Amino acid sequence: MITCSNCETPQFLQITQSRVYFEDGEMINEISESYECTLCGSTGQYVYDEDRDEETITGEVERTKERPKFA
Ligand SMILES: [Zn+2]
């Protein structure tokens, strides 16, 4: 779950750009998503690298495994 670190809710997050990178036409090796919060205007990016099983979050969004507080 990606949430806005300002509002602490995913409720107003909008994906503005989404990309999936393929390797050899089959394996997904990277997922890239850009987010914008329509409430406070925060933006951030989430990148998942499957090869390294690594998640990278930049900007004013955060990844949480908890259930959203206000959803
Ligand atoms: Zn926000």
Image (cartoon, rainbow, N blue to C red):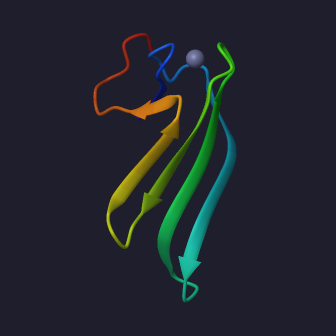
For the question of whether residue 40 can be seen, the reply is: yes
Q: The C terminus lies in which quarter of the figure?
A: top left
Residue 12: quarter of image: top right
Residue 16: quarter of image: top right
Q: Pick whichever, 16 or 71, lies toward us.
A: 16
For the question of whether residue 2 can be seen, the reply is: no
Query: Is 51 above or below relative to 10?
Result: below
Q: Residue furthest front?
A: 59
Query: Is 2 above or below relative to 30?
Result: above
Q: Residue at the location (50% across, 13% down)?
A: 7
Q: Is residue 54 left or right of residue 8?
A: left
What percent of the width, then of the height, locates residue 36?
A: 66, 30
Q: Pick whichever, 7 or 59, lies toward us.
A: 59
What percent of the width, then of the height, locates residue 18?
A: 65, 52
Q: The N terminus lies in which quarter of the figure?
A: top left
Q: Is residue 66 left or right of residue 34?
A: left
Query: Is 67 above or below relative to 16?
Result: above
Where ligand 1 lies, by quadrant? top right
Q: Is residue 37 left or right of residue 30?
A: right
Q: Residue furthest bottom?
A: 24
Q: Residue at the location (43% across, 10% down)?
A: 70
Q: Pick whichever, 68 or 4, lies toward us.
A: 4
Query: Is 18 above or below relative to 6?
Result: below
Q: Residue at the location (34% across, 59% down)?
A: 54
What percent of the width, then of the height, locates residue 52?
A: 33, 69
What percent of the width, then of the height, locates residue 9?
A: 47, 18
Number of disc labels:
0
Q: Residue at the location (47% across, 72% down)?
A: 29
